[in-house]
Image (cartoon, rainbow, N blue to C red):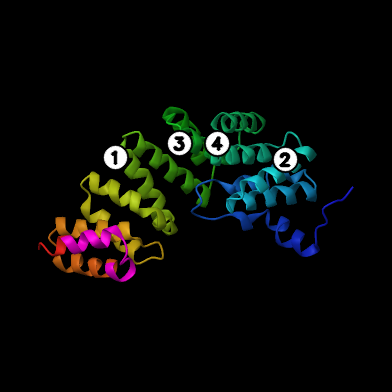
Amino acid sequence: MVYLTLAPSFEAGVLGRCLHFLSRPLLWVSWALLSCSHSLAQQDARTQAHLALAAAYVQADMMAHGMSEADKVLALSPNLPEALALKAIIFQRQARLDLAAHFFQQSSQLAPNSPQIAHNWGFFECQQGRFESAFEKLAFAHAHSEGLERDKSLWIWGDCLRQNGQLTNANLKMSQALQRQPSFISEGLMLARLKIELGSHAEAEKILDLLNDSPSVSAQSLWLSVQLAQRQNQAVKKNHWGKMLGLLFSNSAQWRAYQEGASHD
């Protein structure tokens, strides 16, 4: 039998940091389920290494490899909730929704107090339009998390409220999350559109200014800024964002729309 051998640097760098290297701030799946939980603390290095590799494959969108590694984990530890939750995420990404729901439920039964599993299950439930179930799980995740993970749950909770038509409450929760986590600006287009829908144009403008000055600038964010500036009779800002749209996204539909609109000014 061949065993996975871990180099000392791997153990010190990855396992010693409780797999923190997998955390990506704006990946709305909660990878904190791979942190030093009680169940993981009792697993051997091979189990933890396979789980880390499975999660890395999933983040790289290599689902078949992620599933293979998750199955290796479950062969070693059949009732490890983190591995079952990871399989649920894989099935979710593969649109195998019945299986995803089954594994979310199974992992939650084994770890009912896990805010990370509650977060991921709530995200899944929201995608399926089961809003009340999603709100319950995301509220639990938010109440029992800290820092980044807490605010990720708050943001997803807000987005789920938005999808359910509860716009004022959605705006409140997402704005609070963004205030505490400035890096969430990469997802700011959604919140800016929400604020415009609510008539909070000045707040939307601030978010779009930050977004357009960030690496997450897009043709969509610049075009929305152009439209908002036109609505507010801000000719200088409209021209500024229009020029940036042409400079950065000259092949976009938004740039063509801007040129057509500008020719009629």
Asked which secondary structure carries label 2, the reply is helix
Q: Amino acid at mark 1?
A: Thr
- Mark earlier in primary sequence (2, 1): 2
The residue that appears at 31% across and 34% down in the rendered structure is 165
Q: Nearer the viewer, residue 60 or 154?
A: 60
Q: Nearer the viewer, residue 206 or 56?
A: 56
The circle drawn on residue 168 is 1
- Mark earlier in primary sequence (1, 3): 3
Place of residue 85 in the rendered image (x, y in percent of width and height, measured from the top left): 62, 38
Q: Residues within 10 Å of mark 1 (few under 14, many from 20)?
A: some
Cα separation between marks 2 and 3 = 25 Å
- Mark earlier in primary sequence (2, 3): 2
Q: Which residue is mark 4?
A: 118
Q: Residue furthest right?
A: 1
Q: Amino acid at mark 2?
A: Asp
- Up the image or down, 52 lies above or below 252; here it is above
Q: Amino acid at mark 4?
A: Ala
Occupied quadrant, residue 112? top right
Answer with left or right where residue 205 lies relative to residue 105: left
Task: Confirm whether residue 245 shows in the render.
Answer: yes
Place of residue 63 in the rendered image (x, y in percent of width and height, measured from the top left): 62, 46
- Mark earlier in primary sequence (3, 4): 4
Q: Amino acid at mark 3?
A: Gln
Asked which secondary structure carries label 4, the reply is helix
Q: Which residue is mark 3?
A: 127
In the image, which is nearer the foreground, mark 2 or mark 4? 2
Cα separation between marks 3 and 4 = 14 Å
Q: Residue furthest left?
A: 265
